[in-house]
Structures are given as C-alpha cells and as structure tokens.
Amino acid sequence: MNKNSSNTMALTPNTSNKRETVCIFGTGDFGRALGHKMIQSGYPVVYGSRSTQISNLIPKDAEVLGHAEAAQKAAIIIIAVQRQHYNFLIPLAEVLRGKVLVDISNNLKLNQYPESNAEYLAQLLPGSKVVKAFNTVSAWALQSGTLDASRQVFVCGDDVEAKQMVMDIVRSLGLTPLDKGSLLAAQEIENYPLQLFPMWKFPIFLSLGLTAFFFFYCLALDVIYTYIYENNNFSFFIAITIPNRVCPVMALVLLALVYLPGIFAAIIQLYRGTKYRRFPDWLDKWMLCRKQLGLIALAFASLHAVFTLVTPMRAFVSWRTSKGIISQALNNKTEPLDNTKAWLSDSYLALGILGFFLFVLLGITSLPSVSNSVNWREFRFVQSKLGYLALILCTAHTLVYGGKWFLSPSAYKWYLPNIYILSLIVPCAVLVVKFVLIFPCVDKPLTQIRQGWERNPKYSE
Ligand code: NAP
C-alpha cells in the first residue's frame, strides 16, 4: 500500500465537515483533476490504478492502491477510464456489488456505440448501481477552476438513492447537478459534449445565406449596373458602402425573424383551438434559436453603427461634398436649407439610435447573469414588449431612410426593387399580423387558449 502524503499543507481536507471516501479508478487527466477538486472540497480520495507507483502528478493526500483494494474503501467509485478498457472491471464484479459506479466517459463521435457507455457498464456489472455524471466538465476546467460556463453537471441513473449521493458530491464541488432522469438519458448526455454549437447552426447558416444574397444583390445593382449603364467605376463600394447596406438590412430581417415564429405559433394555436398539440418540428427548432438569431442581429446592428460613424472620413463622401460646394459656387447660387429633408434625416438618425439602444438592451438581458436577476415577467416584458418596440423603431428607421426609393422609377434598376424595400417585407408583415393579434377579438381567445382552454376538449367529462 502506498501513501502519498508528502505535502500536507497544500490541500488539507475540511476535517470539521468529514466526508465519505471516494474512490477513483484511473489516474489519467480526468481522474487526477477530479481527485484534486474532491480533496479541495474535503473528500478523502483513494485511487484504484494498475500501478501503485506514486507520480508527482497525483494529488497530494490521495492514496493509490490496486483496484480491488481501493474499491473496498469507498461506497462510490468513479470510473475515470475509457470505455474500451471496461473489461478490466469484470473480475472485480464481486467487490463492486452494491456500490455506486459513476460513469464519466465520453465518446469520440455521436452515437459511437449502439448503447450508451453507462448502460454498457450497467450490463457488465448488473450488481452495481450505475450513475452517469461529470462527462460535460473538462479536466482542464476542473484543474484550473474556470468553471463559470460549465457549472451544470447532467446526472442520470436508475437508482434514486445512488443518484442523490452523486448529486450531493456534485453540489459540494461547487457545481450544479441537473437530474436528467433514468439511465436511458445517458446516450443524450454522452452526445452533448460532441455537438458543436447545436443551437447556433441554423442561425449562422441562415445569416451566411442571407448575407451572401444581399451582398450580391447590392453588388449587381450598385456596382455592376452603374458600370454597364452609367460607365462609373464604383467597385470601392465593396469595402464600406455595400457592407453598410447589408448590415442594417440583415439586422432588421433577423430581428423580424426572432418574432416571426411567435406569430406562426399564435396563428396555429388559434386555428387548432388548443395549446396541447405540439408545433411542427421546424417551428419548435426555430423557436429554440430565437436568442441566437437576436444576438447575430445585434452584431449586424453594431457593425452598421460603426460603418456609419466612419462615413465622414471617406474620400468618396468628401469628394461628393466638395463637388456640391463647388457647383454652388460656380453657379453663384446657395441652395436653401430644405426643412423637410432636414427633418427626415434627423428623424431617421434618431429612430436608428433609439432602435439600436433597445437592441443592445435586448442583448444584455439575454445574458444569463442578467436574465437570472430578473423575474419571468420582467424578462418577458423586455424580450417581448421592448423587443417589438425595437422592431418598430428599426423598421421606421429603414422606412424613413429608404422610403424615398419606393416610388422613384430610378430605384428599380433591372426592374428589381431597392434593397431597403426588400428588407422591409418581413418586418412589416410581422408588425401588421402582430397588430391584428392584439385586437381584443383575437387576443381574448388566444389568451384563453394559452391559459389552457380548448375549443374541442379531447377529454371532456
Ligand atoms: P486518460 O488520461 O487516457 O486516462 C485514462 C486512465 O485509464 C489511465 O490513466 C489509466 O489509469 C486507466 N487505464 C488505461 N488503460 C487501462 C486498462 N487497459 N485497464 C484499466 N485502466 C486503464 O483519459 P482521461 O482524459 O483521464 O479520461 C478518462 C475518462 O474520462 C474517459 O472516459 C473520458 O471520456 C472521460 N472524460 C475526460 C474528460 C477530459 O477532459 N479529459 C472530460 C470528461 C470526461 P491507471 O494507469 O491509473 O490505471
């Protein structure tokens, strides 16, 4: 038996609150990081290893024994070994009978095996109580203490008492256990760390697709058309002018797409007369990524604000301004201030600034640290009421700026509408339908449905 206790100062367990010994099989990266954290939290830790040689990497104050000997010292055994080596546990079945085995393993790809690793472990050792936990926490995060983004630990298992014991450990390590139910949930929990931004895929692909579409649309109308028909080379528009058209358009369209699924949901509920039937899959998925769509919209709005601020520095703008001044001087004629134009330009700027302010407010309230500090009603108020107000202001901003092109025939190059006209279609549709939905004759039945009333109850007495 080896005892590793050369430095007793470093991680002295909290003896005032004596905790039960925990056994960890495997002295690899994760086993060591978890053991280190457990000792810090006051748990005596004993390692079960193929080699009882002490290495400098093993946490101070931990014991290192053979597997069978270590298992006898604890009621909970954490299996910090890859699934492909689980066969070494079979000869230990008797020692492990009745013990809680914590499966922390991950795979290299989604659904790598027909059953989850935890279910496989339970099949190998039917006499033990298997609990899945800790697989979503990384060894590095445990070791460095940077657990802010991943405090949640998914836990599942068939034995309620065993699961409770593991959740108690999770809590005392300063993490938050989330009970995911029986061991059947293990497959989902194991797939979780293998997914790359699952909630961001659709919003990112949609944004890339729309950005490319609007970019080439502007390129065709503002650069290629002008070159062919007006013999002007405005290719430098690619750097700032076109991005500063595409960004606000994207911000507005994506913000409208945040509120569009809610409109569809309301129409579906009104049509079905119940809230107890599931929405179609596409709508469910769309609803779940509204926050991501909103954050991408905010990024485009911020870029638009920055592009707009640099506009006065541009050579093209100073050339256009001096050309105007020189032509007035040559004609010996000062153009009077056009009050309507001044009103329009000040109004669209004011609407844009207010809309952007609300946009930023929506973004800030979606941060977990902020949303956790407001109640559900306050969160709904900001995200729904202020969100719609942001949409109204941004739509009005675009309308006041781009409205002048609606009736001008020169705006329809190649019979195509100006990009600002295009960008207003979805937001205006959302606002008009929302306006209809808040009419009392529509809002009342919708509110009743959302409170549980059904037009044709399935289970009437
Ligand atoms: P690792 O560094 O490769 O360590 C695995 C340990 O398993 C080895 O150090 C060894 O310990 C033991 N082992 C290796 N071959 C064995 C065999 N044939 N029979 C018995 N024991 C054997 O792996 P790890 O990164 O610590 O990961 C361990 C488990 O934690 C994996 O299932 C992994 O998916 C999971 N996990 C890891 C992380 C992470 O960030 N690393 C995060 C979440 C979950 P001894 O030499 O002491 O016997």
Image (tube, helix red, strand yellow):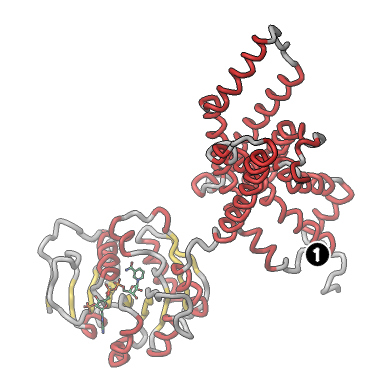
Residue 29 percent across, percent down from the top left: 26, 69
Left/right of residue 339 with respect to residue 120 in the rendered view: right
Kind of residue at disc 1: Thr
Q: Is there any visible trace of residue 302 in the rendered image? A: no
Residue at point 28%, 71% (across, down): 31
Of 213 and 249, nearer the camera is 213
Task: Decide if ligand 1 comes within 8 Å of the CB at mark 1.
Answer: no
Query: From the viewer's perspective, is residue 271 above or below residue 413?
Result: below
Left/right of residue 423 with respect to residue 88 in the rendered view: right
Of 226 and 356, nearer the camera is 226
Q: In which quarter of the image is ligand 1?
A: bottom left
Residue at point 40%, 71% (across, down): 165
Query: From the viewer's perspective, is residue 262 above or below residue 332?
Result: below
Residue at point 71%, 44% (across, down): 423
Q: Quadrant of residue 204?
A: bottom right
Q: Is there any visible trace of residue 300 in the rendered image? A: yes
Residue 169 percent across, percent down from the top left: 37, 66
Q: Tag 1, which secondary structure?
A: loop
Q: In which quarter of the image is residue 143?
A: bottom left
- The furthest residue to the top: 332
Residue 233 percent across, percent down from the top left: 59, 36
Query: From the viewer's perspective, is residue 371 above or below residue 90?
Result: above
Residue at point 84%, 70% (across, down): 457
Of 421 and 97, nearer the camera is 421
Residue 330 percent across, percent down from the top left: 66, 10
| Quarter of the image with the N terminus in it | bottom left
- The furthest residue to the left: 6
Q: Name the residue under label 1.
A: 274
